[in-house]
Amino acid sequence: MTRSFAYARVSTTGQSVENQLREIEAAGFSIAPHRIITETISGSVAARERPQFARLLDRIEPGDALVVTKLDRLGRDAIDVAETIKALAAIPVRVHCLALQGTDLTSSTGSFTMSILNAVAQFERDLLIERTQAGIARARSQGKRIGRPPAVTPKSEAEIIEALDAGASVASIARTHGISRATVAKVRDRAKNNSTMG
């Protein structure tokens, strides 16, 4: 027998899920109260990282149906929504979205909708990669260093080499400069390599 679940989410405590639950009921879905999962959590949190949604995934079984009012209830962006629906379809669970006239997103019509959503998700991924690469290129052109800052400054590195030459131990130098022994060892090895190359 098919069991129906509803998932309703709001972003802040000042909001209520009541309107979403009324919409689901008005659409003809009769869902037992213990199968209504509600959550107050930001839409920027991925679906699988939401405690109540994770609880829903633990309870839902093959042949069940999940009802939501809008796609954005299921994820933070097109990528997240597409992955969430793919995971539900793999169970398999039917996913009804009221904003799409109650279409089951795992049906053939739903698959068409999902192919469009997947195209949007891919576009978002490509755009993100493009923006990231453009940002890195711009930062490099402005002479900015990319990645983590160096553990030691050129001045500190000179002091470390001087202390090593004077016979100080790696441990004592690390304590003095507030860095790890591994960092001191890297400075020492780099200095040795430079001296052999020179």
Image (cartoon, rainbow, N blue to C red):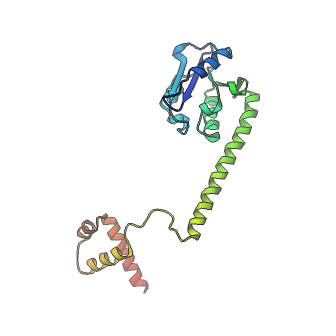
The quadrant where residue 84 appears = top right
The spot of residue 137 in percent (x, y) is: 60, 65
The spot of residue 60 in percent (x, y) is: 56, 22
* Residue situated in front as seen by the camera: 79 or 63: 79
The spot of residue 156 in percent (x, y) is: 33, 74
* Residue situated in front as seen by the camera: 99 or 170: 99
The quadrant where residue 25 appears = top right
Q: How many marks?
A: 0
The quarter of the picture where the C terminus appears is bottom left
The quarter of the picture where the N terminus appears is top right
Q: Residue at x 25, y 68 (%)?
A: 176
* Residue situated in front as seen by the camera: 31 or 142: 142
Tell me: residue 110, above or below residue 6. Answer: below
Q: Residue at x 27, y 77 (%)?
A: 164
Tell me: residue 10, above or below residue 190. Answer: above
Q: Is residue 188 visible?
A: no
Q: Is residue 113 visible?
A: yes
Residue extending farthest front: 14
The spot of residue 114 in percent (x, y) is: 71, 35
Tell me: residue 125, above or below residue 45. Answer: below
Q: Residue at x 63, y 56 (%)?
A: 131
Q: Is residue 14 left or right of residue 121?
A: left
* Residue situated in front as seen by the camera: 175 or 21: 21
